[in-house]
């Protein structure tokens, strides 16, 4: 990266943009690990943690997150059922987290921004969050920072 491009990229980044995030995973240790890893990331705020799909739908509707870190296999509703319950205006950017690679294609068909295969590390999570920040940067130039519904159209599953 050239110095000019690096300077421009840093200038273009909204420095005070906080990514409001929900962690949804039925495993307590997985939620704790994600919370710990997210604590090392600048401008990420965990606004809710959920341990089942029904709770996740309620949290998305009440907290209006920018980002949903969503496990696939959860009690009540699985991750894909959670997405089907949300309307396009309610839909945050979604990153699936799973121990199973067999769901990756389906996740991208559901317009997930990324798919984190457990166990993942800080670097992998950081790269996924950089993608989220890029989406918000592009979206803020096109309209408003939260208008990412065009990235999450759910007619593929």
Image: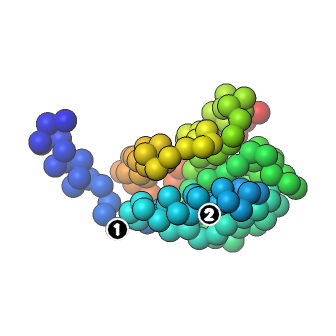
Q: Relative to 128, say whether 147 is above or below.
A: below
Q: Relative to 48, say whether 147 is above or below.
A: above
**Extreme residue in the left direction:** 3
Q: State the separation of the CA atoms marked 2 and 1.
A: 25 Å
- Which residue is pictured at 12% across the width and 42% down the height? 4
Q: Nearer the viewer, residue 6 or 25?
A: 25
Q: How is the image coloured?
A: rainbow
Is residue 61 in view? no
Q: Choose the circle earlier in sequence order: 2 or 1.
A: 1
Image location (x, y in percent) of residue 38:
49, 60
Image location (x, y in percent) of residue 25:
71, 56
Label 1 crowd (10 A; few <14 / some 14-19 / many >=20) = few
- Which residue is pictured at 32% across the width and 60% down the height? 14
* Residue pointed to by mark 1: 16
- Which residue is pictured at 42% across the width and 60% down the height? 41
Indicate the secondary structure of the residue bearing disc 1.
loop
Quadrant location, the C terminus: top right
Q: Is residue 135 left or right of residue 86?
A: left
Q: Is residue 73 left or right of residue 64?
A: right
- Counting labels gives 2
Quadrant location, the N terminus: top left
Is residue 114 in view? yes
Name the mark nearer the viewer: 2 or 1: 2
Indicate the secondary structure of the residue bearing disc 2.
helix
Image location (x, y in percent) of residue 40:
42, 62
* Residue pointed to by mark 2: 32
Q: Relative to 4, say whether 17 is above or below.
A: below
Label 2 crowd (10 A; few <14 / some 14-19 / many >=20) = some
Point out which mark residue 157 bears.
none
Image location (x, y in percent) of residue 132:
47, 49
- Which residue is pictured at 64% across the width and 69% down the height? 48
């Amino acid at each position: 990266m050239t110095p000019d491009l690096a300077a421009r990229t840093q200038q273009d980044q909204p420095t005070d943009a906080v990514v409001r995030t929900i962690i949804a995973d039925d495993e307590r240790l997985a939620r704790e690990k994600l919370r710990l890893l997210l604590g090392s990331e600048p401008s990420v705020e965990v606004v809710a943690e959920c341990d089942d799909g029904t709770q996740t739908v309620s949290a998305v509707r009440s907290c209006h997150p920018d980002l949903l870190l969503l496990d696939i296999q959860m009690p009540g509703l699985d991750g894909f059922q959670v997405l089907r319950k949300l309307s396009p205006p309610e839909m945050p950017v979604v990153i699936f987290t799973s121990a199973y690679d067999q769901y990756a294609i389906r996740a991208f068909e559901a317009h997930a921004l990324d798919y984190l295969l457990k166990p993942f590390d800080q670097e992998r999570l950081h790269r996924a969050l950089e993608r989220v920040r890029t989406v918000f940067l592009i979206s803020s130039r096109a309209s408003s920072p939260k208008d990412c519904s065009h990235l999450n159209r759910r007619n593929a599953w």
